[in-house]
């Protein structure tokens, strides 16, 4: 048996091992970059659509029912996933229109309006500013008990009675979410 010296043994090992096929890396063409770009645009658009349908709402206020908080022409962003609590400004649908108002009472609460004062379960409504409120022209009768899965909504501009005084309690499925951001559009 003959032994090979170090150099010869290395040559034999190199011959025994098949050289791996070298893969040439293809350069990206403008078509590849365009495809990547449009895929990124499509994914971004899908995420934005999903957010706008299920998480946030984007609305423009038409009217002064929530004046002074939300003025005519303001862009309003709502959050659809949160719980709705009394005192929060919300967006809801009534008469086929998008409206804004403040939750005065939740399911099971008794609402009474008398002497220009709103009472919830016998107590005066806690507000930063006390707005004179009337039940004159209201379609619902007071005292009014809010049904299950509904909220009683009142406009901040209380002279406008197109709120729960006209529509009754607003079902939760008609609520678009609570207002989280108001962007002033007028005067820009």
Image (cartoon, rainbow, N blue to C red):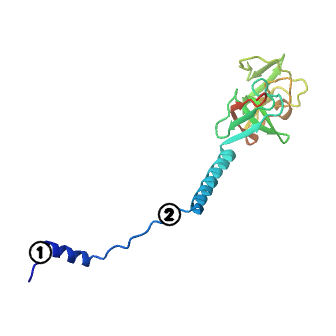
Q: Quadrant of residue 13?
A: bottom left
**Front residue (pair 46, 27):** 27
Count neighbours of disc 1 (C-alpha within 10 A) and say few if under 14, some if 14 to 19, many if 20 or more. Answer: few
Where 67 sits versus 95, above or below?
A: above
Query: Distance of mark 1 from mark 2, alpha carbons?
Result: 44 Å
The local secondary structure at tag 2 comes to loop
Q: Position of residue 79 (x, y in %)?
A: 67, 38
In the picture of the structure, the residue carrying the numbered disc 2 is 27
Q: Residue furthest right?
A: 137
Q: Nearest the camera: 178 or 168? A: 178
Direction from residue 165 to residue 89 in the image, left or right: left
Residue with the most extreme left position: 1
The label shown at residue 5 is 1
- From the top left corner, tell me how far across and down residue 156 is, in percent: 78, 24
Total marks in image: 2
Tell me which residue sits at (25%, 78%) in the image.
Answer: 15
Residue at (65, 51) in percent of width and height = 45
Image-quadrant location for residue 6: bottom left
| Earlier residue among tags 1 and 2 | 1
Task: Name the element at disc 1.
Answer: loop
As drawn, the label of residue 127 is none
User: Does residue 46 appear in this view?
Assistant: yes
**In front of the other: 4 or 174:** 4
């Amino acid at each position: 048996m003959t032994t090979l010296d170090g150099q010869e043994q290395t040559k034999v090992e190199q011959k025994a091992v098949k050289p791996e096929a070298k893969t040439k890396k293809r350069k990206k063409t403008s078509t590849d970059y365009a495809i990547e770009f449009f895929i990124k645009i499509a994914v971004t658009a899908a995420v934005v659509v999903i957010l706008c349908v299920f998480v946030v709402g984007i609305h423009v206020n038409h009217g002064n029912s929530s004046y002074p908080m939300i003025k005519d022409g303001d862009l309003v962003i709502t959050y659809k996933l949160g719980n709705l609590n009394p005192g929060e400004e919300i967006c809801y649908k009534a008469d086929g229109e998008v409206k804004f108002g403040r939750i005065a009472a939740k399911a099971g609460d008794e609402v009474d309006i008398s002497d220009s004062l709103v009472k919830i379960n016998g107590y005066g409504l806690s507000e930063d500013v006390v707005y004179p409120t009337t039940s004159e022209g209201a379609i619902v009768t007071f005292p009014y008990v809010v049904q299950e899965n509904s909220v009683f909504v009142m406009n901040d501009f209380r002279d406008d009675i197109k709120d729960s005084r006209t529509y009754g309690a607003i079902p939760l499925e008609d609520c678009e979410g609570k207002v989280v951001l108001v962007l002033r559009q007028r005067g820009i």
